[in-house]
């Protein structure tokens, strides 16, 4: 069984600037709750690295 890892973000500013409020987070295992949280973080312009054993699960988040 393979694994999947992706980086998602909707960054519009420099994430390394000390004046912004962008978070860089990682989610390991995208169960229902973590998947929903990940989608909300991405919509809030945060950078999220996700890992799940199932590429299908990662692709569902990628489409949002």
Image (cartoon, rainbow, N blue to C red):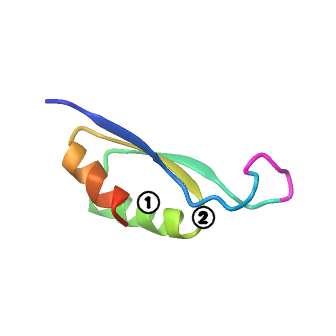
Q: Earlier in the sequence, mark 1 or mark 2?
A: 1
- Look at discs 1 and 2 and give the one toward the viewer: 2
| Category of crowding for the residue at label 2, using alpha-carbon neighbours closer than 10 angstroms: few (below 14), some (14–19), many (at least 20) | some
Residue behind mark 2: 45
Q: Main secondary structure of the magenta part?
A: loop
Q: Is residue 26 above or below residue 11?
A: above
Instruction: Depth check: give the residue in front, 36 or 47.
Output: 47
Please state which of residues 47 and 29 is positioned toward the viewer in this rendering.
47
Residue at 31 percent of width and 45 percent of height: 29
Q: Is residue 46 above or below residue 6?
A: below
Question: What residue is shown with label 1?
Answer: 38
Percent across and percent down for residue 57 are: 24, 52
Q: Residues within 10 Å of mark 1 (few under 14, many from 20)?
A: many
Would you say 43 lies left or right of 58 here? right
Q: Residue at x 30, y 37 (%)?
A: 4
Q: Distance of mark 1 from mark 2, alpha carbons?
A: 11 Å
Q: Quadrant of the C terminus?
A: bottom left
Q: Quadrant of residue 20?
A: bottom right
Where residue 24 appears, as percent x and y from the top left, is 61, 48
- Please state the extent of the stretch shown in magenta in the rendering: 15-19
Instruction: Please give left or right for residue 40 compared with residue 4 in the image.
Output: right
Q: Position of residue 37 (x, y in %)?
A: 43, 64
Secondary structure of the residue carrying numbered label 2: loop
Residue 26 magenta-drawn?
Answer: no
Above/below status of 11 relative to 27: below
Q: Residue furthest left?
A: 1
């Amino acid at each position: 069984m393979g694994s999947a890892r992706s980086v998602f973000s909707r960054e519009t500013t420099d994430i390394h600037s000390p004046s912004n409020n962008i978070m860089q987070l990682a989610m390991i295992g995208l169960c229902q709750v973590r998947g929903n949280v990940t989608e909300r973080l991405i919509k809030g312009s945060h950078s999220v690295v996700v890992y799940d054993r199932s590429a299908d699960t990662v692709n569902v988040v990628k489409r949002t």
